[in-house]
Image (spheres, helix red, strand yellow):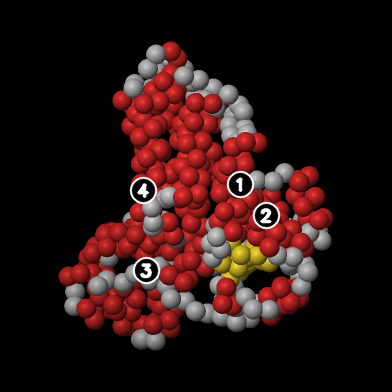
Amino acid sequence: MPGHATSAPADAVPEGLLHRDAPWAALPADVSTALGAVLPQLVEEIIRCIPQEVPEYSRPLEGEFGAGVRRGVETALRRLFVDLPGTDQPGLTAQTRTVYRQLGVGEARAGRSLEALLSAYRVGARITFRAVATAATSAGVDPALMMPLGESIFVYIDQVSAASIEGFTDEQGRQLGERDRRRQSLVARLLAGRVDEVEARRLAARAGWVIPGQLIAIVLPPDRAEGLRLALGDRALVSTHAGQVVALLEAPHSSRARAELEHALVGRRAWLGPARSWELTRESHRAATLAQSLSEGRGDTVGKPRWVDEHIAGIVITSEPDLIADLARRRLEPLQQLRPGQRQRLAETLLAWLRHRGERARIAEELHVHPQTVGYRLTQLREVFGDALDDADTRFDLELVLRAGHRPA
């Protein structure tokens, strides 16, 4: 590629990292020379893949809706790879913001949730990054530019998503009562993380809500949300997001307030996120959503409310089930030489041994067996695992997979 795109200085990436909201500033202005040829094909590829990967759009993208999607894709690629590289301009102009706001408005008017549109954006971002990375490599673009290139795509998609969320919630609010509209819009803006303090406090005042010093996000299934607004009162902002009901309210500062909140949520299968400042609302929401998703994936139907900060270790352990399963297969492999009944007994004994740091009396108490039986099983474990049980990393891995619920087949 001619010009400075192929000879970007080694400090291009660190410089780009200074522009967290405009990572395209780290890209050479003529990057479109390397990528221009692929952009028309990329538009068609994205339009082709969206119906295949987003079930809600599993139909030809035609008519007014299809034209809107195509306009959004073309606008994004032109803005991202022609207008923005080498500048610190905001990702969206007033005109481009309108394009994505209107896509959100259209989803609300069609009676769909916003998740389908946001999924389509993620599909587009993934396809775009793959295509432009390939094109840039073929054109000899400095590999150091791949990081700001990828970051530019995903920061831009964040801004596009925020504009669509704004359009979606504004249109929903027009159809609802003015106060409810303002509250739902505020929830969406806080969860998107794209609102400054002045704007947040203005929106909160209009919604009749005071932003607390510390707040929590609560998530629960829609079928458990009946009467939730009444149960929580005006102190809570209640809305829907990505198919779940979300409530935002001040973090309880006393055991009494905590107990009252738990009482209001009994039977609702609610997860309560960690306390955060309002600027970090989406962190509390993300933690609660992850916990809920993992518990539902295990078929967990516990009705009582649960606090994320009381289950952090379990959430972390189960958040990457495929990797944990791989680790379990590797670390528990020595037990495969035994009979099935022996495997299970020794696995339970091994977990108790790890949990109680080898204290036989406590192991025996947990397993409801005689200490002599514990000694016999520990001897078997030594025969099976050998010196590996003396290795701290191996012991950590074994405790991790056993606490995650894995047992030898």
Give the residue at x 49% y 50%.
Answer: 65
Identity of the amino acid at label 3? Answer: Leu
Task: Tell me if 382 is positioned left or right of 51 in this view.
Answer: left
Question: For the residue labelled by badge 4, is the local secondary structure a helix, a strand or a loop?
Answer: helix
Q: Quadrant of residue 345?
A: bottom left
- Give whichever of discs 2 and 3 has the lower sequence position: 2
Verify CB contact (< 8 Å) between mark 4 and mark 1: no
- Front residue of 56/292: it is 56
Identity of the amino acid at label 4? Answer: Cys
What residue is disc 4 on? 49
- Give whichever of discs 4 and 3 has the lower sequence position: 4
- Give whichever of discs 1 and 2 has the lower sequence position: 1
The extreme front residue here reads 63
What residue is disc 2 on? 170
What residue is disc 3 on? 402
The label shown at residue 101 is: 1
Question: Mark 4 to mark 3: distance in Å?
Answer: 40 Å
Give the mark toward the camera: 4 or 3. Answer: 4
Question: Mark 1 to mark 3: distance in Å?
Answer: 48 Å
